């Protein structure tokens, strides 16, 4: 059927050619040109000639070069943490009869959408220099090492990102058919051997997929290392430091760092494709494996463990929420109930909160509209051109926000296109960063819709374009909406590009949180964080409730 | 007053494959016409060309004498029933069936009347308010049919409409489809790969292979007088053996297979090698020393036998080693032949079809 779908309106220049043109033009202006400018800026000497001196400098000075090692080390440790924490819980959810699995799974999604810098901030509230627990222990005469630095980053990110592994492994385990393991047992394998020779290999692609996702996300993360890393710099934070220090001067070093960063993430993605690649086992599941029901003691222990992990990962959100109602004076918090922090936030930065909502809503709408159209082109009108579009539209997936931030400043701060200092630069950065997710969400649902449904509408006398709107687009709606909500959530929590691009009046709630934390205004930071978390958790829980498990795997 | 459809020298090529190589057909007003062939033979491609989902590379399609192939699909006024029904899952049965009428801006009262009428035709009026996911496969099929008929199309196209139903329902539905089509007198093109279905339902059919029409005719024609080896083997069960031509006389020819010489209807273009095709039911087992005047007698050894209820199917190995099927009707348990037993059988020359050997598929 695939090759047949394209024939209908081939010869005419139609709406779809227009959409293709617009999509390519947007990708060119909003992605290719800025990235080209970024590369150019890193290669342009003071004399206007080509030079590699910034790269030499970056790699020669340990102050810069070690950040590459730091990034890999931190991401590796975060991945390890995520695997260790998530795999047992995944087995619990998939294989053991424990109470409240659905709740457990829903809760496990929440860390994924809560921004890591709020997590980092919350661990500082607990274990920082003046942290609740630090102070408590000090009173008891115990000194503990501070949470700042590498282990702080690993703690914050590990507990933030483990659900990627959890969901993918649990999904793979639940997709296993009972007969597979029975067949192995029937062939004379002990349960232990079955586990190692069947269960592990078959779920390995999902495990690796989850692990690579964690690695990549950790590598590109800016907010958490910035807040909790202190002296421990990773690539995204050094790029920011270089950029801030040289504001107004030559941003060449920042561009160099950003280029190196994007080279690393692209490399990681290529490795991911190579490792995980096409290696998925297609499984026709007839009977899922029934969960085992262990004895009451073991069951209690396992249940406790599962909930402990998930609750632990939600501690940051709880701590922040509680703190937001404390009285505060700078970094000092008094455990008396007060709405002062909210008052302060709502009176001082109402604009930033409004900006966040307006910008993420607007960019999400743009993403959803263009993403849906592109998904349709890519799935239903296959050609060399739409295949190229499909690849191009996925590029932003490999580009960390930090890189987008630097690239946009470099590209759009002088003619022909000047956008710096406007809201447009934020809007476009958000839009382009999340476009791949909308396209993915759209094409995922489109693959489930039979092309002949649209043809039926056409043959009944409705024009192709109206048939698309009345039938296909309508049937895509559930996928589009849940994809849109995920996009919205990811956008409103964006900090890594925003921190470069916001300007004066166009500050956002994430910038406010970051600045309040930096200047030790812990009370208002907590209030702003709580507002953001509530804004993010509610739609996600709604989507999860409405869509079941499918919504999450699209993240 | 039905619609005539003329398909003239239609060609369609996909990147590598010639899907339709110069296809011409004439379909009479009110006729039930079937495109029959194996998957990939071009039958669905041709149907989609008529529907307007594919553009022709060359040729024309005329509907009542007017060009059809140049019209956009949505203006062709053709009812189509899809293999997977393509019911709109977000609309009720009533909304599905009235969809095309709504697009034609039919006045509300008439829309209601015609929708109900279409639903009554397929005996679905009581389920008008159901959602598609509450319907069985057969019911969805009926909705698809009603939806296509409600617009009173010039032409009804059906793309393997029964292939997703179970065997019993399939037989029921095909009778139903034929009854409706007759009742409405609507010119219908029906696509299927199921030769039994095609024989049962069609007034005329075109057997297609590799983008070409092999033969057009009534079900009797294509079964009894196949014009190519492909048709002979695709329609019904067949034994096909290769032999050497040893003599001809008028329409008859003699062919030698191993030591066995048999007579058959010789078709033009026979050369030294000939493909010999005869149907299992045209063979008759002979009793010990028995004879059958006018028929060719052959010999073989029983390899195995399958009891299929109405018939008993023997697999025989001929002297030259080739295997053939022989069907015995109303099998008698008293006269069973054992495995390994040597048997003699007769075949009438009129039941033996000869084709040039190189045209064997």
Image (cartoon, coloured by chain):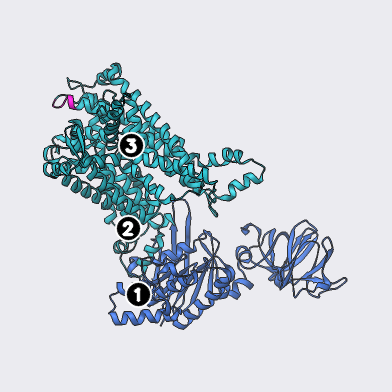
Q: Which residue is mark 1?
A: B98
Q: Are marks 2 and 1 on the same chain?
A: no
Q: Are marks 3 and 1 on the same chain?
A: no
Q: Which residue is mark 3?
A: A398
Which span of residues is magenta-colored?
A244-248
Closer to the observer: label 2 or label 1? 2
Q: Which chain hosts label 2? A: A
Which chain does blue denote in the image?
Answer: B
**Residue B239 can be seen, yes or no:** yes
Residue at figure coordinates x 53%, y 42% from the top left: A202
Shade representing chain A? cyan
Disc number for residue A227: none
Residue at figure coordinates x 81%, y 72% from the top left: B333
User: Could you say where residue B129 lies in the image, as x and y percent from the top left?
Assistant: 38, 75
Q: Is residue A410 left or right of residue A390?
A: left
In this view, the residue in front, A277 or A164, is A164
> Chief secondary structure of the magenta span?
loop
Quadrant where the image shows the N terminus of chain A: bottom left
User: Could you say where residue A356 lies in the image, as x and y percent from the top left?
Assistant: 19, 45
> Secondary structure under badge 1?
helix
User: Could you say where residue A266 lies in the image, as x and y percent from the top left?
Assistant: 35, 33
Is A247 in the magenta? yes
Looking at the image, the residue that sits furthest to the right is B289
Q: Which residue is mark 2?
A: A477
Between the C-alphas of marks 2 and 3, the distance is 27 Å
User: Could you say where residue A468 lies in the image, as x and y percent from the top left?
Assistant: 32, 61
Quadrant where the image shows the C terminus of chain A: top left
């Amino acid at each position: 059927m695939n090759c047949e779908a394209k024939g209908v309106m081939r010869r005419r220049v139609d709406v779809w050619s227009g959409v293709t043109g617009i999509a390519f033009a947007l990708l060119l202006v909003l992605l290719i040109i800025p990235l080209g400018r970024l590369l150019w800026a890193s290669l342009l000497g003071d004399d206007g000639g080509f030079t590699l001196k910034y790269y030499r400098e970056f790699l020669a000075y340990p102050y810069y070069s070690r950040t590459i090692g730091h990034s890999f080390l931190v991401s590796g440790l975060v991945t390890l943490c995520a695997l260790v924490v998530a795999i047992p819980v995944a087995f619990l959810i998939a294989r053991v009869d424990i109470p409240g699995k659905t709740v457990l799974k829903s809760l496990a999604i929440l860390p994924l959408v809560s921004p890591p810098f709020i997590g980092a901030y919350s661990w500082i509230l607990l274990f920082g220099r003046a942290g609740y627990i630090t102070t408590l222990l000090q009173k008891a005469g115990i000194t503990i090492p501070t949470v700042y630095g590498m282990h702080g980053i690993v703690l914050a990110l590990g507990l933030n990102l483990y659900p990627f592994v959890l969901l993918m492994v649990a999904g793979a385990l639940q997709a296993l058919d009972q007969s597979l393991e029975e067949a192995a047992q029937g062939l004379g394998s002990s349960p232990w051997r079955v586990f190692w020779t069947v269960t592990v290999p078959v779920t390995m692609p999902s495990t690796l997929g989850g692990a690579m996702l964690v690695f990549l996300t950790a590598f590109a993360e800016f907010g958490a290392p910035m807040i909790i890393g202190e002296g421990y710099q990773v690539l995204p934070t050094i790029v920011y430091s270089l950029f801030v220090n040289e504001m107004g001067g030559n941003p060449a070093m920042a561009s160099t760092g950003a280029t190196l960063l994007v080279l690393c993430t692209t490399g990681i993605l290529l490795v991911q494709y190579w490792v995980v690649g096409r290696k998925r086992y297609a499984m026709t599941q007839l009977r899922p494996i029934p969960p085992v029901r262990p004895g009451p003691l073991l069951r209690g222990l396992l249940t406790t463990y599962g909930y402990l992990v998930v609750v632990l990962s939600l501690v940051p959100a709880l701590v922040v929420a509680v703190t937001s109602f404390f009285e505060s004076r700078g970094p000092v918090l008094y455990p008396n109930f007060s709405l002062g922090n909210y008052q302060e936030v709502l009176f001082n930065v109402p604009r930033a909160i409004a900006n966040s909502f307006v910008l993420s809503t607007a960019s999400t709408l743009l993403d959803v509209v263009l993403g849906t159209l592109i998904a349709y082109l890519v799935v239903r009108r296959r050609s060399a051109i739409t295949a190229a579009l499909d690849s191009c539209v996925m590029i932003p997936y490999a580009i960390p926000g930090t890189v987008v931030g630097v690239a946009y400043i470099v590209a759009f701060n002088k003619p022909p296109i000047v956008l710096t200092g406007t809201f447009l630069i934020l809007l476009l950065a958000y839009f382009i960063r999340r476009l791949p997710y909308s396209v993915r969400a759209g094409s995922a649902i489109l693959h489930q819709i039979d092309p002949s449904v649209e043809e039926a509408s056409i043959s009944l006398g409705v024009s192709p374009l109206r048939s698309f709107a009345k039938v296909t687009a309508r049937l895509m709606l559930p996928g589009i909406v849940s994809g849109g909500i995920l996009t919205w959530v990811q956008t409103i929590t964006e900090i890594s590009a925003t921190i470069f691009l916001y300007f004066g009046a166009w500050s956002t709630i994430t910038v406010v949180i970051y600045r309040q934390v930096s200047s030790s205004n812990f009370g208002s930071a907590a209030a702003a964080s709580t507002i953001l978390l509530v804004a993010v958790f509610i739609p996600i829980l709604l989507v999860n409730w409405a869509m079941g498990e499918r919504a999450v795997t699209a993240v | 007053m039905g619609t005539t459809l003329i398909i003239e020298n239609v060609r369609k090529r996909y990147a590598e494959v010639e899907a339709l190589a110069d296809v011409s057909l004439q379909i009479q007003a009110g006729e039930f016409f079937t495109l029959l062939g194996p998957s990939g033979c071009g039958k669905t491609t041709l149907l989609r060309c008529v529907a307007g989902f594919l553009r022709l590379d060359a040729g024309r399609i005329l509907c009542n004498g007017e060009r059809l192939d140049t019209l956009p699909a949505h203006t062709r006024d053709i009812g189509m029933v899809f293999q997977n029904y393509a019911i709109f899952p977000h609309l009720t049965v009533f909304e599905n069936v009235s969809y095309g009428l709504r697009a034609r801006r039919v006045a509300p009262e008439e829309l209601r009347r015609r929708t109900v009428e279409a639903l009554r035709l397929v005996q679905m009026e009581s389920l008008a308010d159901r959602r598609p996911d509450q319907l069985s496969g057969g019911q969805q099929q009926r909705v698809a049919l009603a939806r296509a008929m409600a617009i009173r199309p010039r032409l009804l196209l059906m793309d393997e409409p029964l292939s997703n139903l179970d065997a019993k329902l399939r037989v029921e539905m095909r009778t139903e489809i034929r009854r409706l089509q007759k009742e409405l007198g609507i010119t219908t093109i029906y696509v299927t790969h199921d030769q039994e279905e095609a024989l049962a339902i069609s007034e005329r059919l075109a057997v297609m292979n590799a983008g070409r029409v092999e033969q057009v005719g009534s079900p009797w024609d294509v079964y009894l007088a196949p014009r190519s080896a492909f048709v002979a083997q695709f329609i019904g069960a067949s034994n096909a053996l290769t032999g050497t031509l040893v003599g001809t006389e008028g329409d008859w020819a003699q062919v030698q297979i191993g030591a066995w010489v048999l007579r058959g209807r010789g078709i033009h273009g026979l050369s030294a090698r000939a493909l010999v095709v005869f149907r299992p039911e045209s063979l008759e087992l002979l009793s010990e020393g028995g004879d059958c005047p006018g028929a060719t007698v052959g010999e073989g050894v029983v390899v195995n036998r399958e009891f299929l209820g109405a018939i008993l199917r023997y697999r025989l190995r001929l002297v030259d080693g080739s295997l053939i099927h022989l069907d015995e009707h109303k099998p008698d348990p008293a006269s069973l032949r054992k495995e390994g037993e040597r048997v003699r059988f007769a075949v009438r020359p009129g039941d033996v079809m000869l084709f040039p050997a190189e045209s064997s598929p």
